[in-house]
Image (spheres, rainbow, N blue to C red):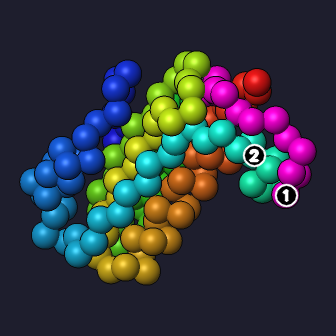
Amino acid sequence: MLIKGINPPSLDKLLEEAKNDASSAKCGMYLTHVGIVREDAKAKVRENKENTKPVVGMEFSYDEEKVNAAIKSAMEMDGIYFVRVWLVSGKLKVGDDIMRVLIGGDIRPHVIEGLNALVGEIKNNCVGEVEIYE
């Protein structure tokens, strides 16, 4: 489920919701992902381009329909029973939260694979990120 709102949900509250969900009896593990705006540009950390300017902010957006499709796909993976995703949109500064994801499932390999697949799909196909430099 996609959670809407300006402020990121508390991870404690998300976990409490997960543990109170009907799926909790099937879940032996929950994992979270918290994405945050960093000062190192993507080109620096992914392509080793050392001469990049520091990032001071980011314009972030997402396609709700695509995010919901990614969540649905994650819920169809083996052993995955619980998913919550929160994304922000707008102009952000270094240190601001971009996303929070909580995923729960039966065993560690399924949950790790589910989190990796879901966050990868969101980052690669559902969001727009424009870095703002000094």
Query: Which amino acid type is shown beneath numbered disc 1?
Result: Asn
Task: Point out the residue furthest to the left here.
Answer: 20
For marks 1 and 2, the one nearer the N-term is: 2
**88, above or below 82, in the image:** above
Residue drawn at (89%, 45%) of the image: 51
Pick the quarter of the image with the N terminus: top left
Q: 14 or 82: which is nearer to us?
A: 14
Looking at the image, residue 109 lies above or below residue 103: below
Res. 33 in view: yes
Give 69 or 131, whichever is nearer the viewer: 131
Crowding near pointer 1: few (<14 within 10 Å), some, many (20+)?
few
Picture coordinates of residue 11 (x, y %)? 27, 47
* Circle 2 residues within 10 Å: few <14, some 14–19, many ≥20: some
Residue at point 18% right, 44% down?
Answer: 13
Image check: 46 left or right of 12?
Answer: right
Q: Which SS class for mark 1?
A: loop
Hey, which quadrant is residue 27 in on the image? Answer: bottom left
Residue with the mark numbered 2: 42
- The x and y percentages for residue 36 are 52, 42
Quadrant holding the C terminus: top right
Question: What element does badge 2 sit on?
Answer: helix
Q: In x, y percent, where is residue 133?
A: 76, 27
Q: Which residues are magenta?
A: 48-60
Instruction: Say above or below: 70 vs 58.
Output: below
Q: Is residue 65 left or right of residue 134?
A: left
Q: Is residue 121 magenta?
A: no
* Mark number displayed over residue 48: 1
Q: Give the percent coordinates (x, y) of residue 83.
A: 34, 52
Of residues 108 and 36, which is closer to you in this image? Answer: 36
Kind of residue at badge 2: Lys
Residue 130 visible within the image: no
